[in-house]
Image: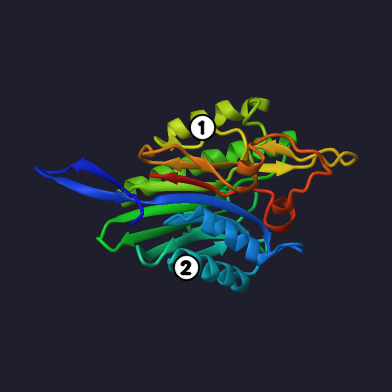
Amino acid sequence: MRPVRVKLRDGAGSCEALLLPSLGTFNIRLFPDRDTDPGAVAERVAELDADLFMVQEIRDPEVFDTVLAEASRRLDRDYAVSLGPMCRTSELSLGVVFDRDRYREIEHRVQAQLDPEARCSCRDGHPPALLSVLESTQGQRLAAMSVHLQYGGRRWMHRARRDQWDHLVSSIGRIRAELGVPLAVAGDFNSTGYVDDDRGERRLIEQMVDAAGMVLATAGLECTAYWRPNRRTRDYVPSMLDHILLSDPPSGAVEVLGMCATLAGAKCPGEHANPDFHRVSDHCPIRVQW
């Protein structure tokens, strides 16, 4: 049996044992991209081995189902995914993957349902997101939200993310007040300025997480993805784009897997073999025990 955290909460004269899951997030770039190897992606999902995890940039749900089936076979799990559109103008989806041996989905809400004005935009209003409300086999409920914020390091892109954070914090407040269950928000926040606090992005995230009353489980990380900014050398450079926010503190340290673990978050020469970057994604899976 996989380890779970038993958390005691005071009730009206009693304490309720709440079993919280292992969870993660994984942006699987443009899945499947031209060079994507679904078998290699299944290996990374199996390495993640989480009870539930958020995914982004899913282009072909049927191919992704084959990945989940292979990962399920390797792990003796039964993975399913709940998907929704990233935004009106995108061909991509994001979603929440969960182990049906542990959870069933009782509700999900797409971006337009999370936005008070019913917008489904890549840039305006609520950031691209999907919320899944899950119920465990013990009858306990939790909520998981997959998100994908505006990409890029230009000034207007930083401003767009700042606006999206405002909407996300408001959404978190509404969800927690309505549902009253543990909440995890995870995904690709595209926080290009997180490590060096470029344009105050790290301070902004810390302030927003605090305003939402959440815990930033990924606060100590410096690498969740790689990119190649120099077209001449094509070096692989670490970046910190993905985050996990929790309504309750995690019971253990967050883990970064895949090439981020293999390369230990270090810069890598362009001629170095880095197959995950091409066959899997530019992002790495992240896992935490809640």
Q: Which of 159 and 242 is in front in this view?
A: 242
Residue furthest right as drawn: 232
Q: In this view, does 175 lie above or below 239?
A: below
Count of marks overlaid on the render: 2
Query: Seen in the image, is 269 located left or right of residue 107?
Result: right
Mark 2 lies on a secondary structure that is strand
Image location of residue 157, percent across then percent down: 70, 39
User: Label 2 belongs to which residue?
Assistant: 80
Q: Residues within 10 Å of mark 1 (few under 14, many from 20)?
A: some
Mark 1 lies on a secondary structure that is loop
Mark 2–mark 1 Cα distance, whole angstroms, equals 29 Å
Q: Is residue 62 above or below residue 273?
A: below
Image location of residue 56, percent across then percent down: 59, 56
User: Label 1 belongs to which residue?
Assistant: 219
Query: Seen in the image, is 238 located left or right of residue 21?
Result: right
Residue 144 visible (yes or no):
yes
Q: Which of 115 and 250 is in front in this view?
A: 250
Residue furthest left as drawn: 13
Query: Seen in the image, is 87 located left or right of residue 15?
Result: right
